[in-house]
Image (cartoon, grey):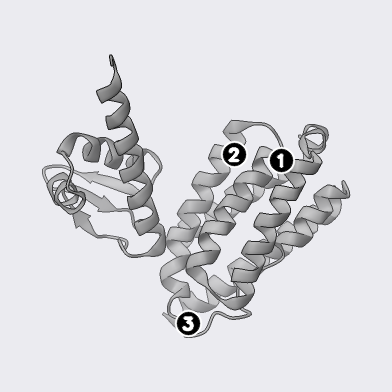
């Protein structure tokens, strides 16, 4: 079939990019780690072309840097970078609730809200249990669904990018705590209900409390290190 090889390669490229992104977020590919296309291709048992394309995709997402004649390196984010990420995601979410309120509420169908509630409950349970690996996946899916309520794919993409980068910075710090139970933000369900009730002010208050909680926790862990 014409084009079937191109489709296969594109799918492989996406699968490799997703797998490596998960490794970076989870900290299994730590900040500063260097590697080559050949190394990753051998690890996954594939050719170099889809690997190179996948790595360049992750560079465009701000997770990797290209090192001339050396390969790639996992990007290292500073504490100042993290505070800028919090500011950026705050502006995105506030704009989502404030300037796109009517559009968001129109998109908040019973089906969409039911799906967001399921994600919220799953993320909240993982956060309360201190299960970081499970929380990351559900938390990212939850915020993608919340952004989709606005019906603007650019907002969803921007928010997802910033949230992924924030997780990349925070995960190594969080893993230094022996017990995360009760330490992670878990008010996802409350945020969904605020949107369902069209209470934008409450939603913004929850987001503000979330950001304050996150910054306090990361400041505490950064001071320890």
Q: Nearer the viewer, mark 2 or mark 1?
A: 2
Q: Residue furthest top?
A: 2
Q: Residue furthest bottom?
A: 178
Looking at the image, do the residues carrying marks 1 and 3 touch, with CB atoms under 8 Å apart? Answer: no
The residue sitting at 17% across, 48% down in the picture is 45
Residue 34 sits above or below residue 55 on the image? below
Q: Position of residue 171 (x, y in %)?
A: 45, 67
SS for dot 3: loop
Query: Would residue 32 be found to the left or right of residue 143 on screen?
Result: left
Q: Is residue 97 visible?
A: no
- Mark 2 → mark 3, Cα distance in angstroms: 31 Å
SS for dot 2: helix
What residue does disc 2 label?
156
User: Tag 3 or tag 2, which sits nearer the N-term?
Assistant: 2
Seen from the viewer's position, the closer of residues 90 and 197 is 197
Query: Would residue 24 be found to the left or right of residue 39 on screen?
Result: right
Query: Would residue 62 be found to the left or right of residue 203 on screen?
Result: left
What residue does disc 3 label?
177
10 Å neighbourhood of mark 2: few (<14), some, or many (≥20)? many
The residue sitting at 63% across, 52% down in the picture is 142
The residue sitting at 46% across, 53% down in the picture is 165
What residue does disc 1 label?
95
The residue sitting at 44% across, 62% down in the picture is 169
User: Tag 1 or tag 2, which sits nearer the N-term?
Assistant: 1
Seen from the viewer's position, the closer of residues 23 and 225 is 23
| Residue 109 quadrant | top right
Task: Assign the N terminus to one quadrant of the image.
Answer: top left
């Amino acid at each position: 079939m014409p084009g079937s090889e191109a489709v296969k390669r594109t799918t492989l490229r996406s699968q490799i990019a997703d797998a490596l992104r998960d490794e970076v977020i989870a900290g299994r590919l730590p900040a500063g780690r260097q590697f080559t296309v050949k190394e990753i291709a051998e690890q996954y048992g594939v050719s170099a072309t889809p690997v190179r394309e996948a790595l360049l995709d992750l560079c465009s997402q701000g997770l990797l840097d290209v090192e001339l004649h050396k390969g790639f390196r996992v990007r290292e984010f500073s504490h100042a970078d993290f505070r800028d990420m919090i500011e950026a995601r705050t502006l995105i979410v506030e704009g989502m609730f404030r300037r796109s309120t009517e559009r968001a509420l129109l998109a908040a169908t019973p089906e969409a809200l039911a799906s967001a509630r399921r994600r919220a409950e799953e993320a909240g349970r993982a956060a309360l249990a201190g299960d970081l690996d499970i929380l990351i996946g559900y938390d990212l899916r939850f915020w993608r669904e919340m952004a989709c309520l606005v019906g603007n794919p650019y907002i969803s993409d921007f928010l997802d990018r910033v949230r992924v980068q924030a997780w990349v910075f925070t995960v190594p710090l969080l893993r230094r705590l022996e017990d995360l139970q009760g330490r992670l933000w878990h008010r996802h369900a409350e945020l969904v209900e605020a949107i369902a009730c069209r209470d934008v002010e409450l939603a913004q208050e929850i987001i503000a409390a979330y950001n304050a909680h996150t910054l306090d926790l990361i400041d505490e862990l950064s001071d320890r290190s």
